Image (cartoon, rainbow, N blue to C red):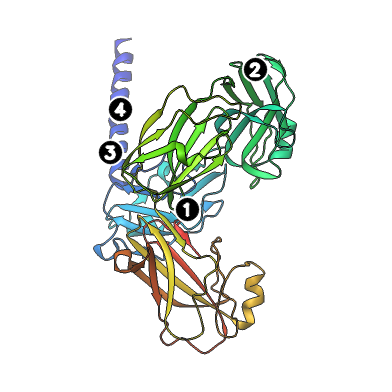
Amino acid sequence: MKKTIGHFLSYLSLAFAAALVFTSCSSDNDLQITAKNFQDIVEQQQNLTFTFSEDLAPDSLINQWSKETYITFTPAVKGKFKWTGKNELTFSPEVRFEESTYYTGVFSDKISSASADKKELRDEDEKFTFHTPYLNVVNLNTFWAKNEIDRSINEVVNELTFNYTVNTGQLKNLMEITVGGSAVAYDIHTNGVNSLVSIAIKENGNYNDKPIVITIKPGLKCTTGTYQTKEPIVFKSVIPSKDNFRIIQIQSLYENGKGYLQVTTNQEVGSTNISGQVSIDPAVAFTTEKTNGGFKINAEFTEKQTYSITIKKDLEGIFGGRLPSDYEQTIVFGPQEPYISFANKKGIYLSNAGFKNIGLQIINVTNIQVTVHKIYENNINAFFGQNSHYFSSNEYESDYYSDYDYLDMSDLGDIVYDKTISTKSLSKDNGVSLLPLQFDNVNDFKGIYVVKVQSDNDNYINAT
């Protein structure tokens, strides 16, 4: 019996030693991913960065866009790769990741080829998965209003903000609302497709300070893709009292590169002279406009600047009540997200000869990559079959452009301009950056120019 136990322990020791040797060999011979800048969920607009266990890229490739495809995505994602460090690879998508979509990425053998010892990527790192946020309600704003058609009818308005657009017709079939525990009828004031849906409940009894529960049954679909919700979406709130006019909050926000303040109230504003009830320190010229459940303050607000906002107690709600006292709040405009757009969506910039200037709104982008495609005359119909916005030249005199997803135009024409430019080098006119384009040695074929401007680091920040 002792001999049997002794043999068993000997075999166990040998097996353990062999396992240690195998593990050690596996660790030495395999290339590994030691870090990623994402987990299971990624934003629709973000880069993907991978850090490897050893240096793979020579100095000559650092911070240069590569023509290699290091990762194959399913579904496919158009984008570029760049070595942002000797052992760090970044993928930058040119368009948004799709809504509520599950992705798989598989590394190609070009990663192993880059290794000095031709090490293979270990099995658990060869493939990875992630998904964009699934469809959900991200905010509920509840306030009192009067029916737009019959002003004698009071309504509780619930503004549901989804992270993606939804079809309001389908939403109507899946949604139930209770007030104080009892089901109530409702009307959807938003038609068609939208991410902000306004839902009105006619006043029936005393709804002041009553709990409200909005339930959306499983099956709600995104307007793009095939995803549909698998679990109920439940949002709870409390209906404010319409007898007391209150300011809920003031938020500093950005829209299309412009800062503004959103003042949220518990009912529609009744005052006609809102601007006269608002003061801002430091002083800045501003205008106001009513919104559902509050109002906006528009001004040339400065990034990272702190403002003191005072709203006088004379401001009235739609039911005649006033604020109990002056409302004061300190607001800071934080850093803006990087942003690129054309300054004048209907400006004529490109002609068939001479110097060309394009006005751009550029925010927090250090370098831009400018690419100009010339679409030849015989391919114009094919191009317009895919797009309705363009820059024209030659006999096409009506120059017009707008932002749209960038498509592969390599079969329709040639790249006549491709350059990386520091945004600091661009001259400005009234805050608009002027991009000069001078095409040297452009052939004489007639056609149209398609211009794309994108961040050199984040390809998804672009305008075309």
Q: Quadrant of the N terminus?
A: top left
Q: Where in the figure is residue 440, as x and y percent of width and height?
A: 40, 85
Three-letter code for the amino acid on which mark 3 is drawn: Ser
Spatial CA span between label 3 and label 4: 12 Å
| Residue pointed to by mark 3 | 24
Q: Secondary structure at mark 4?
A: helix
Question: Would you say residue 135 is visible in this rendering?
Answer: no
User: Within the image, what quadrant is residue 198 found in?
Assistant: top right
Using the image, tell me which numbered label, if any, was put on residue 16: 4
Spatial CA span between label 3 and label 1: 54 Å
Spatial CA span between label 2 and label 4: 71 Å
Q: Are marks 2 and 4 in contact (CB under 8 Å)?
A: no
- Mark closer to the chain start, 3 or 4: 4
Q: Are marks 3 and 1 in contact (CB under 8 Å)?
A: no
- Mark closer to the chain start, 2 or 1: 2
- Mark closer to the chain start, 4 or 1: 4
Three-letter code for the amino acid on which mark 2 is drawn: Tyr
Question: Would you say residue 206 is visible in this rendering?
Answer: yes
Spatial CA span between label 4 and label 1: 63 Å
Q: Secondary structure at mark 2?
A: loop
Three-letter code for the amino acid on which mark 4 is drawn: Phe
Q: Which residue is found at the position 46% from the left and 40% from the top? A: 276
Q: Is residue 286 above or below residue 449?
A: above
Q: Are marks 3 and 4 in contact (CB under 8 Å)?
A: no
Q: Are marks 4 and 1 in contact (CB under 8 Å)?
A: no
Using the image, tell me which numbered label, if any, was put on residue 256: 1
